[in-house]
């Protein structure tokens, strides 16, 4: 998700993910403007276009090119868990086993009976 948290009436984003070919508008969400982009792993440069002016967000990673243009950096790395063996293949334990609830004995709505 790419977020613009500053002023502006119209906010869009363009980036190196498509060689700067398209400009996509962000949607207002409260005070922020957001867009959800699905991209493959990689490092991308992008910039915001706020009310027709190129802008960057100083709150996230950014860089300048040789010409002095400022861009934000989006570094998407593929997630690989460090310890794959620790991931359990079984689902969660049922309520009766994990909390001692006797679910079969509930006789009236809103009443729970606990095992002693």
Image (cartoon, rainbow, N blue to C red):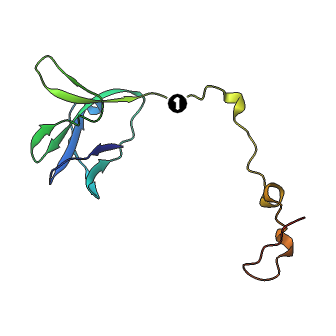
Label 1: element kind: loop
| Left or right for 68, reference 30 | left
Q: Is residue 23 above or below residue 93?
A: above
Find the residue positioned furthest to the bottom: 108
Left or right of 78? Residue 85 is right
Task: Decide: is 102 above or below 98.
Answer: below
Determine the residue located farthest toward the right in the rendered image: 116
Residue placed furthest toward the top: 66
Is 101 left, or right, of 48 in this rendering?
Answer: right
- Which residue is label 1 attached to? 79
Q: Position of residue 96 (x, y in %)?
A: 82, 61
Tell me which residue sits at (74%, 48%) in the image.
Answer: 91
Tell me residue 73's x, y (percent). Answer: 29, 29
Q: Residue at x 22, y 41 (%)?
A: 13
Residue 58 vertical placement versus 5 (above, below):
above
Quadrant location of the N terminus in the rendered image = top left
Q: Position of residue 6 (x, y in %)?
A: 20, 47
- Binning the other alpha carbons within 10 Å of mark 1 as few (below 14), some (14 to 19) or many (20 upward) gives few
* Residue at 9% across, 44% down: 52
Does residue 51 appear anywhere in the picture? yes
x and y, in percent, of residue 95 in the image:
77, 60
């Amino acid at each position: 998700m790419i977020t613009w948290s500053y002023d502006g009436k119209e906010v869009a984003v363009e980036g190196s993910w498509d060689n700067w070919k398209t400009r996509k508008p962000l949607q207002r969400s409260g005070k922020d403007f957001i867009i959800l982009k699905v991209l493959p792993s990689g490092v991308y440069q992008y910039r915001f276009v706020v009310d027709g002016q190129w802008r960057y967000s100083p709150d996230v990673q950014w860089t300048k090119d040789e010409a002095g243009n400022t861009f934000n950096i989006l570094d998407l790395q593929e997630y690989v868990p460090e310890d794959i063996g620790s991931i359990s293949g079984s689902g969660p334990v049922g309520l009766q086993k994990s909390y001692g609830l006797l679910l079969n004995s509930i006789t009236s709505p809103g009443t729970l009976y606990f095992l002693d």
